[in-house]
Image: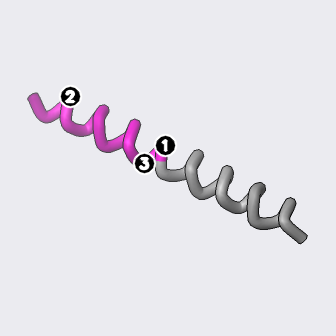
Amino acid sequence: MERIARGDLTKKLKDDKVKIVKDLIIYTNSF
């Protein structure tokens, strides 16, 4: 149970990082 929760958390953190990187790319491309 705990392992599954940890896996979901890791995946969520990864997804958040990807989203931040994409936002940064869009932000820098708008200049």
Q: Is 10 within the magenta? A: yes
Q: Toward the viewer: 13 or 1?
A: 13
Q: Nearer the viewer, residue 17 or 3?
A: 17
Distance from label 2 to label 3 (Cα)? 14 Å
Q: Which residue appears at 90% of the width and 71% of the height?
A: 31
Residue 21 part of the magenta segment: no
Q: Position of residue 23 (x, y in %)?
A: 65, 58
Residue matched to label 3 = 13
Structural crowding at the residue carrying mark 2, measured as other residues with C-alpha within 10 Å and reported as few (<14), some (14–19) or many (≥20): few
Of 14 and 3, the residue lying toward us: 14
Q: Most prominent secondary structure in the magenta stretch?
A: helix
Q: Position of residue 22 (x, y in %)?
A: 67, 51
Q: Tell me the tag on residue 14.
A: 1
Point out the residue furthest to the left here. Answer: 1
Rendered view: 28 above or below 8: below
- In this figure, which residue is indicated by the disc labeled 2? 4
Q: In the structure shown, which secondary structural element does the residue marked by tag 1 occupy?
A: helix
Residue 27 placement, left or right of 9: right
User: Magenta residues?
Assistant: 1-15
